[in-house]
């Protein structure tokens, strides 16, 4: 038996993204994330190149750099865009789609509205990099799961009530 | 030994990277794509594996060098044998084939650690082990002096195969890794865990009293995790339950989440006073954080979405509220503080999304979390209820600083009137 490490095979048809992580894929390889509550799924694509990526960002700001790569909105968006460029995407052609940022329950205090602030911060971070947001499914009080198809540049949003929205 | 929660969170990441390396090694050997589901650093306990009744096979490996200790890697026997048989016909039942795979996967874990710590780790030859959780724990010659366990679980994509890895570092190794004076003494963390376990047992008794469904605490852990890693412990299936906030001295949150079928049983018992008869189905054997994939499919396949409105919702809020009161009952005495909890906020959503919404709040103040989790199950039917407690770390540290050694979590009062 051969114990050598192999690179991730190119023919895998699905890449899972956890909380505070991101991934980039091309053509028919889907990128998925599940259980989005107040976090935001930021999808960015170069539709002409068939390259797209998804970041599961968690907090509007964070000051620790020992965390996972997409914990904060700004870092997540920056790293996602850099990775799409490295995969052959061209900056002038980028488009973005957003989903998430819900408010599942209300407690008093400064931590409130983190979902809404995640959405606002995501829009700002994309605008600063001249990436237009072409579709959104944000807010509300329910969780979401996302599936990004880079080749078709679609972001399928499934809500906790099994309702499906195609962005 | 004093424990810096921030350092433990960092080591949790190291362990996770080791787990990913191990998963790659398994893929390299077998071609099976695996994904690491969850990694936790938990306070070690002699009954850590006691809840695992299913038979597993695997290897224990001793290691020394930059870090010293023992590890245990296990697979479900039928599944790993099927896969090994496909690779080397006739090898399926062979202990040496399991040992070889186990050795390579374990090396991946420890290579990950060695790289992160910038050191070398020497591993001794693997020893084949098989049996139930308690038997496996005995095989690792569990030493009570070991303070922490690093646990990872990975599963194959689209296949029925998983592996569970546990690393038990020696106390001296942990002492060196966690050196620092401003941490929490490990003895106080043990007290905290006992307090939480007692609370979980009381909450379980409350469920039994209120619903007539005999429940017990199946698994409980005190873990130290980066906030972003907390949601991975829950599935994205829909759960029904409540979220409550600790008010006053101790901040943070409590989550009580039933799977939908269990929530229906609870509602039926509270609203009509009736529960379904015990099923012939044996209780689930998927101990640890494993979630059976079949039940996920069942709930997803359901064409109708269950609603919990009006009286059903009130029933869940009520039991969640009383369970939380029972859970924290006794804490105030031990911690010598007052603990007030907010009114319950009802949730009916993906378990992972609920947890994520909680840690997005907590994460604005702290990078790592002290997580207590417990799973309640019933002996005579499928029943699943998760209790998660996530205290505010700074406030917890302040409260623990005042704690006298030797205090226990014995409760002094019963839960409120039912």
Image (tube, rainbow, N blue to C red):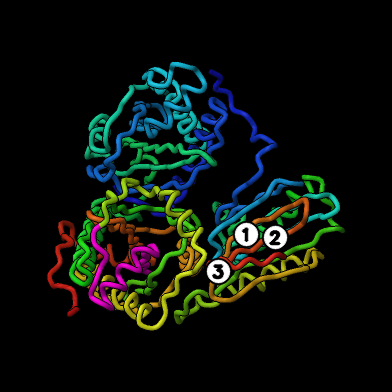
Answer with the quarter of the image where residue B343 lies. Answer: bottom left
Q: On the same chain: label 3 and label 2?
A: yes
The mark nearer the N terminus, 3 or 1, is 3
Residue under label 1: A146
Q: Residues within 10 Å of mark 3 (few under 14, many from 20)?
A: many
The mark nearer the N terminus, 2 or 1, is 1
Q: Chain of mark 1?
A: A
Residue B330 visible at all? yes
Between the C-alphas of marks 3 and 2, the distance is 18 Å
Between the C-alphas of marks 2 and 1, the distance is 7 Å
Q: Chain of mark 3?
A: A
Apparent side of residue B47 relative to residue B93 in the rendered image (left or right)? left
Q: Quadrant of the C terminus of chain B?
A: bottom left
**Location of residue B170 with respect to B273 vertically, above or below:** above
Marks 2/1 in contact by CB < 8 Å: the verdict is yes
Residue at image position (33%, 22%) is B127
Q: Specify start and end residues of the magenta stretch as a single range.
A: B252-278
Residue B395 visible at all? no
Residue under label 3: A38
Q: Residues within 10 Å of mark 1 (few under 14, many from 20)?
A: many
Mark drawn on residue A155: 2
Please provide percent x and percent y for residue B115.
52, 33
Q: Chain of mark 2?
A: A
The mark nearer the N terminus, 3 or 2, is 3
Answer with the quarter of the image where residue B214 lies. Answer: bottom left
**Location of residue B201 with respect to B59 vertically, above or below:** below
Marks 3/1 in contact by CB < 8 Å: the verdict is no
Describe the element under mark 3 as helix, strand or loop: loop
Mark drawn on residue B155: none
Comparing B120 with B259, the one in front is B259
Residue at image position (48%, 42%) is B14
Marks 3/2 in contact by CB < 8 Å: the verdict is no
């Amino acid at each position: 038996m051969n114990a050598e490490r192999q690179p991730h095979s190119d023919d895998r048809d699905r890449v899972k993204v956890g909380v505070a992580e991101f991934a980039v894929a091309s053509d028919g390889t889907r990128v998925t994330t599940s259980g989005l509550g107040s976090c935001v799924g930021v999808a960015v694509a170069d539709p002409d190149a068939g390259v797209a990526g998804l970041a599961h960002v968690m907090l509007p700001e964070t000051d620790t750099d020992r965390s996972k790569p997409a914990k904060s909105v700004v870092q997540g968006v920056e790293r996602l865009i850099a990775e799409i460029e490295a995969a052959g995407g061209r900056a002038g052609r980028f488009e973005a789609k957003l989903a998430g940022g819900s408010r599942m329950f209300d407690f008093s205090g400064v931590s409130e509205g983190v979902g809404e602030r995640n959405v606002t911060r995501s829009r700002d971070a994309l605008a600063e990099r001249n990436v237009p947001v072409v579709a959104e499914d944000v807010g509300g009080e329910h969780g979401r799961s996302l599936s990004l198809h880079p080749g078709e540049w679609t972001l399928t949003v499934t809500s906790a009530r099994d309702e499906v929205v195609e962005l | 030994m004093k424990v810096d929660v921030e350092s433990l969170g960092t080591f949790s990441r190291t362990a996770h990277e080791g787990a990913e390396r191990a998963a790659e090694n398994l893929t390299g050997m077998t071609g099976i794509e695996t994904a690491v589901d969850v990694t936790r650093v938990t306070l070690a306990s002699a009954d850590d594996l006691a809840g695992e009744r299913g038979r597993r096979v695997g290897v224990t490996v001793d290691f020394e060098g930059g870090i010293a200790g023992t590890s245990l890697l296990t697979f479900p026997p039928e599944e790993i044998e099927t896969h090994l048989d496909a690779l080397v016909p006739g090898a399926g039942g062979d202990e040496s084939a399991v040992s070889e795979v186990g050795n390579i996967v374990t090396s991946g874990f420890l290579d990950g650690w060695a790289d992160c710590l910038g050191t070398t780790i020497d591993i001794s030859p693997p020893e084949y082990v098989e049996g139930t959780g308690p038997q496996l724990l005995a095989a690792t010659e569990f030493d009570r002096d070991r303070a922490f366990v690093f646990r990872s679980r990975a599963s194959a994509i689209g296949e029925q195969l998983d592996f569970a890895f546990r690393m038990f570092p020696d106390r001296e190794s942990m002492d060196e890794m966690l050196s620092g004076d401003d941490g929490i003494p490990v003895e106080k963390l043990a007290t905290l865990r006992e307090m939480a376990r007692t609370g979980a047992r009381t909450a379980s008794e409350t469920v039994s009293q209120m619903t007539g469904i005999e429940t017990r605490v199946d698994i409980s852990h005190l873990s130290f995790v980066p906030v972003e890693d907390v949601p991975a412990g829950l599935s994205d299936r829909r759960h029904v339950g409540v979220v409550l906030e600790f008010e006053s001295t101790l901040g943070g949150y409590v989550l009580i989440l039933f799977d939908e079928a269990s929530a229906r049983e609870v509602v039926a018992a509270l609203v009509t006073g009736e529960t379904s008869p015990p099923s012939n189905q044996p209780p689930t054997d998927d101990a640890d954080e494993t979630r059976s994939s079949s039940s996920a499919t069942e709930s997803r396949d359901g064409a109708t979405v269950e609603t919990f409105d009006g009286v059903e919702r009130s029933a869940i809020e009520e039991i969640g509220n009383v369970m939380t009161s029972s859970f924290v009952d006794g804490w105030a005495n031990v911690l010598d503080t007052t603990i007030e909890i907010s009114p319950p906020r009802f949730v009916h959503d993906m378990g992972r999304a609920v947890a994520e919404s909680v840690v997005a709040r907590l994460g604005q103040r702290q990078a790592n979390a002290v997580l207590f989790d417990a799973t309640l199950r019933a002996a005579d039917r499928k029943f699943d209820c998760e209790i998660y407690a996530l205290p505010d770390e700074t406030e917890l540290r302040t409260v623990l600083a005042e704690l006298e050694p030797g205090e226990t979590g014995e409760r002094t009062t019963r839960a409120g009137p039912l």
